[in-house]
Image (spheres, rainbow, N blue to C red):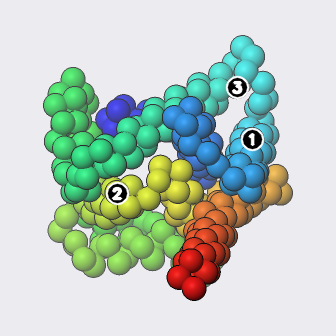
Amino acid sequence: MFFSINMLNNWAFAFSISVPMHIILRSFSSVTTMIMGIIRGKRYSTLQMLSVALLTLGVLVSAWADSEGKGKSMSLGNEASSSDFSTGLAILLLAQLLSAWMGAYVEDTYTTYKASWTENLFYSHIFSLPLFLPLSRSLKEQYVELAATPPPSRQEGILSSKQQLSGSVSIPEMLLKFLGKTGESLPQGMLYLLVNVVTQLVCISGVNLLSSKSSAVTVTIILNIRKLVSFIISTLVFGHQLSAKMVLGSALVFGSGALYGYETSWRLPAARRRKEALTNGAKAVESTEKTS
């Protein structure tokens, strides 16, 4: 499941799905995870379900805005201009359904066996490695291409030539200069791959640690907040243009995540504490009356 979900999420990039759109659509996972929880017998408050409904609306508005920005229809018809986008949406939807199933499975595993999150991190990766064998030829070709890229220091002059005309320096160029100084002799592609591997390790370790201490729905909501940061960084660094509908959709997605967090982490625990205090107080009064 872990291998399939990650492969599907990456495959979607081949079907006209932009990075901001990819981030927003993956935020739909809280909906599928909640549905999976309901099927498994869990109960959620009205505010929790409302926040997930708003998140769903935000995802739909964002998908509509992104489709309009590409000049494509949101209908799932057979139009050639929308076929790639529709395929990308279908792939991401399948990935979210599998992710919800895996989230529930992992939650049950931690509850039943009290396993360490490091065990889950290790085994999910070590069992996935053999599944890459059919892709070995493609991986080798991609590795050769990355290894053949020039060091970042040689790319700096090419990238900065356009910036010299305007007198400004972009965020990607600033990042490139920093990485160029830290790995002057390393090919640019390999340097970026190394940075990506390190950040992925930090990310997936945090997700596994969070999964061992929180419910599946809470994990997806917290990850939506993380996606907000990724969304903003992606927009600033790569220069994506955001329409009013896209801003509205992303605000609904991340605002509903904050609403769910308020309900789950503050209001409901506070209500339970008040109920427990009243119950304990009533028991104390009853015990006093019996003694007297």
Mark 3 lies on a secondary structure that is helix
Mark 1 and mark 2 in contact? Answer it, CB < 8 Å.
Answer: no
Outermost residue toward the top in this view: 78
- Earlier-in-chain disc, 3 versus 2: 3
Q: Which label lies toward us, 3 or 1?
A: 1
Q: Position of residue 63 (x, y in %)?
A: 71, 41
Q: Which residue in the structure is indicated by mark 1? A: 60
Can you see residue 276?
Answer: yes
User: How far, Cα to Cα, is label 3 from label 1?
Assistant: 16 Å
Q: What is the secondary structure assignment of the residue under circle 1?
A: helix
Residue that carries the numbered disc 3 in the rendered image: 82
| Amino acid residing under circle 1 | Leu
Q: Of residues 128 and 97, which is closer to you in this image?
A: 97
**Which residue is under mark 2?**
212
Amino acid beneath label 2: Ser
Q: Are marks 3 and 1 in contact (CB under 8 Å)?
A: no
Q: Position of residue 131 (x, y in %)?
A: 22, 29
Q: Which residue appears at 32% of the width and 35% of the height?
A: 3
- Of the residues shown, which amino acid type is indicated by label 3? Ser
**Residue found at x 53% / y 82%:** 291
- Where the C terminus falls, by quadrant? bottom right
